């Protein structure tokens, strides 16, 4: 279906499946949905300046752990970046410009800052789409290490990572290889958008919610649930033609075993409503 997301060149490259996507640029384009005059380049320059400060402190032969230690010193000691424990659900925690200005964020937004710096320094650092709490993952001498950007860049081995997540879940967790594997940019950005969706849904901010849901549907065009949610939201907002298009596509994609009756019912009622205007 036709994408109706705001003009976002890097986000469009991500949708197209292009390689070497700038995660920070995509995140700032999403922030531009709320800040129309946002100067994306100036915030990218801030990240580059942070990376430069780390670079001059690292010898060419520095180990991965040494580079991580220097990133942690710049971000969490000199700059005093912190996880926003007191106002976790503040939407500003998900907007990268606000995170850089306020030096407060949630796990995924702080991870984007950290990952962007690490990649500029040559680290092969990826997101880890873990349950409960997003982290980063880096390989060092053949072993995976997990970086908790929300908690001062703590570097955890797999067992300590599992223990931390079990503590958050308040029950023992078993982490499958799929959970701890590196995740792609689309997965990371989708998780960030779903955080925003939860906040806007709670606040009944339907205008902002529509923009987020359009991005989620564009980024996950084969995910019937995202298309269904877009269609239902469009119906609520009176955007019947867009809602019909999204719901028809969702109905086509419903996997076997999932009841499709509710989607079909909404499609049928929409068809009747649209016919009245033709």
Image: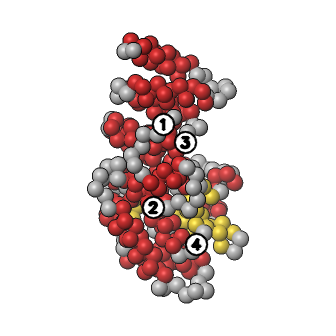
Question: Which is more N-terminal, label 1 or label 3?
Answer: 1
Q: Nearer the viewer, mark 4 or mark 3?
A: 3
Which residue occupies the foreground of this view, 255 or 247? 247
Classify mark 4: residues with Cα within 10 Å, few (<14), some (14-19) or many (20+): some
Q: Secondary structure at mark 3?
A: loop
Mark positioned earlier in the residue sequence (2 or 4) = 2
Q: Residue furthest front?
A: 278
Q: Which numbered circle lies on residue 2? A: 1
Q: CA distance from mark 2 to mark 4?
A: 16 Å
The kind of secondary structure element at disc 1 is: loop
Badge 4 vs badge 3, beta-carbon distance below 8 Å: no
Which residue is located at x 53 percent, y 76 percent? 121
Q: Residues within 10 Å of mark 2 (few under 14, many from 20)?
A: many
Quarter of the picture containing the C terminus is top left
Q: CA distance from mark 1 to mark 4?
A: 37 Å
Q: Considering only order in the chain, which callout, 4 or 1, is on the residue closer to the N terminus?
A: 1
Measured along the vertical axis of the image, is residue 224 above or below residue 32? above
Give the label, 2 or 4, closer to the camera: 2
Residue that label 3 marks: 220
Q: Residue at x 44, y 79 (%)?
A: 52
Determine the residue positioned at 58% across, 59% down.
19
Would you place residue 105 above or below residue 243 in this image?
A: below
Tell me, for residue 24, which label it has, or none: 2
Dot 4 or dot 3: first in sequence order is: 4
């Amino acid at each position: 279906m036709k994408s109706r997301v705001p003009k976002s060149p890097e986000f469009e490259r991500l949708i197209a499946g292009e390689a070497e996507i700038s995660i920070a640029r995509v995140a700032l384009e999403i922030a531009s949905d709320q800040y129309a005059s946002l100067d994306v380049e100036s915030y990218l320059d801030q990240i580059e300046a942070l990376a430069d400060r780390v670079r001059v402190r690292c010898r060419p032969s520095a180990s991965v752990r040494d580079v991580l230690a220097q990133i942690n010193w710049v971000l969490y000691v000199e700059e005093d970046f912190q996880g926003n424990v007191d106002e976790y659900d503040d939407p500003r925690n998900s907007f990268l410009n606000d995170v850089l200005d306020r030096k407060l964020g949630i796990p995924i937004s702080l991870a984007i800052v950290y990952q962007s710096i690490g990649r500029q320094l040559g680290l092969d650092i990826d997101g880890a789409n873990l349950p409960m709490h997003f982290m980063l993952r880096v390989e060092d001498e053949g072993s995976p290490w997990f970086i908790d950007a929300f908690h001062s860049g703590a570097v955890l081995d797999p067992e300590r990572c599992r223990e931390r997540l079990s503590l958050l879940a308040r029950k023992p967790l078993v982490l499958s290889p799929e959970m701890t594997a590196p995740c792609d940019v689309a997965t990371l950005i989708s998780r960030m958008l779903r955080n925003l969706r939860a906040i806007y849904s709670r606040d009944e901010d339907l205008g902002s919610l529509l923009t987020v849901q359009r991005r989620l549907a564009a980024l996950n065009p084969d995910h019937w649930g995202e298309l269904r949610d877009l269609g239902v939201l469009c119906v609520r907002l009176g955007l019947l033609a867009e809602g019909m298009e999204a719901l028809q596509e969702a109905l086509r994609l419903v996997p076997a075993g999932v009841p499709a009756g509710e989607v079909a019912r909404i499609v049928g009622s929409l068809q009747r409503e649209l016919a009245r205007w033709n």
